[in-house]
Amino acid sequence: MGLLSLGTPLPWSEVRKHTDHVREHGIQQFLHIWRNHKDRCGDALLWGDEVEYMVVSYDDQGKRALLSLRQAEILKALEEHETAQRAVEDAQKVKPCQRMPTFHPEYGRYMLEATPGVPYTGALEDLLYVESNMRRRRAIAKEHMAPSEYPVTLASYPVLGVPGQFTEPFYPPTGAASRSLFLPDELINPHARFPTLTGNIRSRRQSKVAINVPIFVDERTPRPFHDPTIPRDRALYPEDANARDGAALDDHIYMDSMGFGMGCCCLQITFQAAGIDEARRLYDQLTPLSPIFLALTAASPAFRGYLADVDCRWDVIAGSVDDRTAEERGLKPLEHDRFVIRKSRYDSTDLYLSQAPEMRDEYNDTEVVKDPAIRQTLVDAGVDGRLADHYAHLFIRDPIVVFSELIDQDDATSSDHFENIQSTNWQTMRFKPPPPGTDIGWRVEFRPMEIQMTDFENAAFAVFIVLLTRAIVSFGLNFYIPISRVEANMAAAQRRDAVGTQQFYFRKDVFSHAAWAAAAPPPAAAAPSPDAASSAPSTPRSASSVASDESLSSLEPAVEDEYALFSIGELINGKHDAGIDFPGLAGLVEAYLDRMNVDIATRCQLGKYIQLIRRRASGELDTAAAWIRKFVRAHPAYKFDSVVSNEINYDLVKMVENITEDREWDGAAASMLGGVKDL
Ligand code: GLU
Ligand code: MG
């Protein structure tokens, strides 16, 4: 999760003296990048996925699945293996898509992250390597672990923070960085960045983070639910009073530390676009898709030993890094702080970015605070209003971690200060300028999805998103709806069983006003070769197209008439009634594949991925969250009191391992995976 600079991290009392410096130089660094790269175009489609894992350590006798804190040893062993493997690959000239994956640290000291060793290209053939690459990553990771350890891909760990032992080795739940009542600081990656982030978020906020997730009320859950596991009489740190003084709400699962959020796992996809305009379009078009894929990948139904009444990690992470002061949260009049800020640093995208003609100003319809001086600097340098707004908004945040050795930098060559703010704005999408000193172009990152238990599912979602981006570019799709509606969808997406129960705002006509696609060759003229997938309409708009946009805009319907409510099933599988003729996102992906003349074998493999997503959306197959909830409720030791005990967790994790290793597709996992694989 972001930049791992080395040096001496400053405490918050010192960081606050440098916040303007970091912001000002961060913006200068961005301007250097922007000037150097704003006109570049024709970059190839390259993309990659990131998979996050939790390493569990089984205590078979005690029937416990503990979180192993051996991240450093495991990563060291993996690094040595990678170095040796790279030499062999170079000698044998191994194809890029078959190169050894790369492993990275993550926030939790029980976590790993893995990416393909080399980015995938736009060739459809590469899509067929994704699943085997993910399987290989897990196998390699496992080979470098102890026999009692296994890398699971669970989005939230059900017993993280329960009383007693949940890590291996055991540490008592306390520590100067988080001051948590439930999590030891030893659970945090010891690289200076992570404990400092944790401590400085708490210091900046002037209280511990307070996350309250509604508890899932089962047949025997006491009402009101007054959590007996909160140590209300402990007084080790001043903040311990928080839990007594109202931070912990009845009928909720209370969590008080960054680890509860950033200790969750996700699946992220990053794409390189042809140029800045295409990156901005993709950023915008993927934004309304974020809640839909959050709902479809929902995999977090349990926190701190309880079943929750939500299915997703999203708001837990948002709360876990919410460094806003009481003034910034609007709880006190502004006296010391500059702005009232509506959302945490981790939350959904606030502003659309593109200048494409179909982007109407009305879509950016929420109140978004911007730093006026930063906006002015950007506009004076020639940056257009929408991009200036984007950064003037991200840069209302303070840097949280500053290393004393890195305060003075050469803005022409460094992007450290820029990245400091940019990469601690954790939104559903991230717009990524080219890093200086590399040949990487403009990129966008799709960040909402929860990690799935199997590599088949993770590959399915990764591949589906890649194909959707190709369909967006190729057909000039228009998914714009007001950003306030996307926010409403984010809330709906996290509700329990959202796929079956919630309705989502979505654009009725996704082909409307697709003027930017008109700049691309017409569909019939586009060569059906894999390379066509990456050819983007980066042609600048001509005077005549501007004129026609203006005449078109007079015909534009009211924004409220452009969208309607859909179920997830309709959004993926299509809706053809009430004046709506929507082929569904799966239909769009299939239409794109039809256009590409894909060979039968490839189509068959991709078809399985599409089927998984179609059946999840229709409710025929369970989400991981629904499956986990059912597993817990069907466990003989479950007392219908919302409690996920260590014993239940042990059996759950063992079963998850069996599912991941393909041993339960037709057995216990049938309701989640069904017969999709044998299609
Ligand atoms: N683990 C975080 C999540 O689940 C993301 C951290 C990162 O940006 O890599 O969203
Ligand atoms: Mg990560």
Image (tube, rainbow, N blue to C red):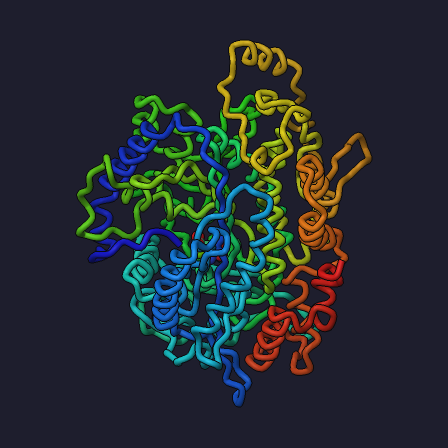
Q: Count how many numbered circles sit on residues in the image.
A: 0
Image quadrant assignment for residue 180: bottom left
Residue 13 visible within the image: yes
Q: In this picture, is 476 found above or below 260?
A: above
For the residue pair 127 and 218, the one nearer the viewer reads as 127
Residue 185 x/y as whole percent? 34, 70
| Percent coordinates x, y for residue 107 in the rendering | 39, 61
Horizontal side of 413 relative to 151 (left or right) equals left
* Residue 219 horizontal/vertical position (percent): 70, 72
Q: Quadrant of residue 474?
A: top right
**Which residue sits at x=70%, y=54%?**
608
**Residue 67 in the figure: left or right of residue 518:** left
Q: Along the line of sight, which residue is nearer the eye, 669 or 240? A: 669
Name the side, left or right, on which 566 lies relative to 399.
Answer: right
Give the vertical position of 77 relative to 561 (above or below): below
Camera-nearest residue between 534 and 553: 534
Q: Residue sitting at 74 percent across and 37 percent down?
A: 583
Q: In x, y percent, where is residue 52?
A: 48, 60
Whether 42 is drawn above or below 177: the answer is above
Q: Residue furthest right?
A: 577
Of residues 256 and 541, the one drawn nearer to the viewer in this rendering: 541
Can the viewer see residue 310 in this picture? no
Q: Quadrant of the C terminus?
A: bottom right
Residue most toward the front? 92
